[in-house]
C-alpha cells in the first residue's frame, strides 16, 4: 500500500492525538502524518515531532495558514470545538478548513462531529451539524464520525471520585453512552485505510452505556473503594456548569444518545472499549488517571 499524506487537525488534543496514535501504529496502512497545532513550540508539539510527525502550525481562524497546511495533502482529519470561541465560531472554523481542502484538491476528509448532531436541541451540537452540512455540500469525498460522551471526561471529576463520590446531573435510571477517545482514533484510521467503503457514511460511535450507579460501581471495582453515585439537580448544576452543559444533561435525561454498540462493532470491525476496560487501563492502581 502506498504511503498516504494525511493532515491531522488538533493533533495535540485528545481526538487528534488518538488519530495520530492509530495512524502511526502501522495497523491501518502507511502514512506520512502531519499534525496541525496552533503552537509548534509547545511541549506537546515537540513530543509529536519526536515520533516522526511533521508539525504544522496553523489556526482555524486563519485561512492562509490552513491553505498552507493542507497543500499537497491527500487525507485530512478535521475536528472542531465550541469551547474556546463559541458555536458560531466553531461552524466557521469547519467551513474555513473545508474550503481550504476544496481549493487544495484534498482527496478525502474525515470529520469528527458528535452523536445526534442534527437532532439534539443543543447549540454546540447544531454547530457541528452545520460543519457536516458544509462538508456534504463541498463536493469532497467524506466520512463523518459522531462520538458520544468521552470516557475521558470523568477525569475532570478525578478528585471527588477518588474521595468516594461521583456527582453528575444524570437522573436515576438514565443510561449515558460513552466512548474511549482511543476508539475514535481507531475508527478514523479504519476509514482512512479503506475510503471506498466509507465515503458518504455518517457513523455514530460508542463503546458502552451505563447508569450513574453503573459508572459508580465500575469506579468502585477499579479503585478498590466505595464510590457512591450522587444525582445532581440539573438546575442547581446550571450555575456551575453553564447553560449549554446544563441543557446537555437535561437532554441526556430526556433520552439522549441511541447507539447499538454490537451493530457498530459489526460494521467497523472494531471491538470498542467498555467502561470497565477503560478504567482498568487508565485508573486502576494509579494515583491519578492517565488521560485528561
Image (cartoon, helix red, strand yellow):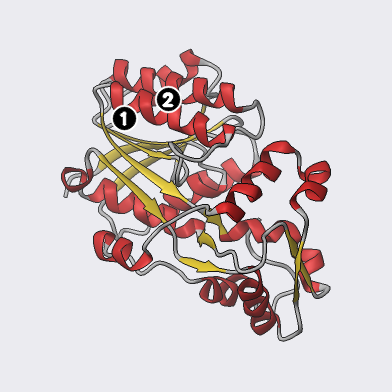
Give the residue at mark 1. 73
Quadrant where the image shows the C terminus: bottom right
Relative to residue 161, is residue 140 depicted above or below? above
Instruction: Name the spot of residue 1 as percent of width and height, x first.
Output: 16, 50
- Quarter location, residue 27: bottom left
Residue furthest toward the front?
254
Q: Residues within 10 Å of mark 2 (few under 14, many from 20)?
A: many
Which one is in front, 113 or 249?
249
Relative to residue 74, is residue 91 depicted above or below? above
Which one is in front, 276 or 23?
276
Q: Is residue 204 visible?
A: yes
User: What residue do we see at 25% from left, 60% from top?
Assistant: 267
> Number of marks in the image?
2
> For residue 106, which numbered disc appears in the image?
none
Q: CA distance from mark 1 to mark 2?
A: 8 Å
Q: Is residue 2 left or right of residue 161?
A: left
Give the residue at mark 2. 69
Q: Is residue 25 left or right of residue 123?
A: left
Circles 1 and 2, Cβ within 8 Å, touching? The answer is yes
Relative to residue 250, is residue 182 depicted above or below? below
Instruction: Name the spot of residue 36 as percent of width and height, x first.
Output: 49, 34
Q: Residues within 10 Å of mark 1 (few under 14, many from 20)?
A: many
Amino acid at each position: 500500500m502506498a504511503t498516504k499524506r494525511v493532515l491531522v487537525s488538533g493533533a495535540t488534543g485528545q481526538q487528534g492525538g488518538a488519530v495520530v496514535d492509530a495512524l502511526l501504529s502501522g495497523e491501518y496502512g502507511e502514512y506520512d502524518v502531519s499534525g496541525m497545532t496552533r503552537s509548534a513550540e509547545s511541549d506537546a508539539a515537540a513530543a509529536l515531532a519526536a515520533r516522526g510527525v511533521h508539525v504544522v502550525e496553523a489556526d482555524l481562524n486563519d485561512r492562509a495558514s490552513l491553505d498552507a497546511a493542507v497543500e499537497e495533502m491527500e487525507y485530512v482529519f478535521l475536528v472542531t470545538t465550541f469551547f474556546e470561541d463559541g458555536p458560531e465560531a466553531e461552524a466557521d472554523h469547519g467551513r474555513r478548513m473545508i474550503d481550504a481542502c476544496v481549493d487544495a484538491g484534498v482527496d478525502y476528509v474525515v470529520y469528527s462531529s458528535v452523536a445526534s448532531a442534527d437532532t439534539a436541541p443543543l447549540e454546540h451540537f447544531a454547530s457541528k451539524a452545520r460543519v457536516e452540512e458544509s462538508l456534504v455540500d463541498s463536493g469532497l469525498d467524506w466520512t463523518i464520525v459522531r462520538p458520544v460522551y468521552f470516557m475521558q471526561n470523568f477525569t475532570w471529576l478525578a478528585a471527588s471520585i477518588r474521595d468516594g463520590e461521583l456527582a453528575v446531573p444524570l437522573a436515576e435510571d438514565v443510561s449515558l453512552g460513552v466512548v474511549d477517545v482511543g476508539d475514535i482514533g481507531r475508527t478514523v484510521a479504519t476509514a482512512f485505510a479503506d475510503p471506498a467503503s466509507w465515503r458518504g457514511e455518517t457513523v455514530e460511535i460508542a463503546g458502552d452505556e451505563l447508569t450513574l450507579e453503573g459508572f459508580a460501581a465500575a469506579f468502585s471495582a477499579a479503585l478498590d473503594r466505595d464510590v457512591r453515585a450522587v444525582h445532581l439537580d440539573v438546575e442547581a448544576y446550571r450555575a456551575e456548569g453553564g447553560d449549554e452543559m446544563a441543557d446537555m444533561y437535561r437532554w441526556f435525561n430526556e433520552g439522549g444518545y441511541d447507539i447499538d454498540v454490537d451493530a457498530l462493532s459489526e460494521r467497523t470491525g472494531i471491538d470498542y472499549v467498555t467502561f470497565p476496560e477503560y478504567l482498568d487501563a487508565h485508573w486502576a492502581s494509579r494515583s491519578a488517571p492517565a488521560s485528561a
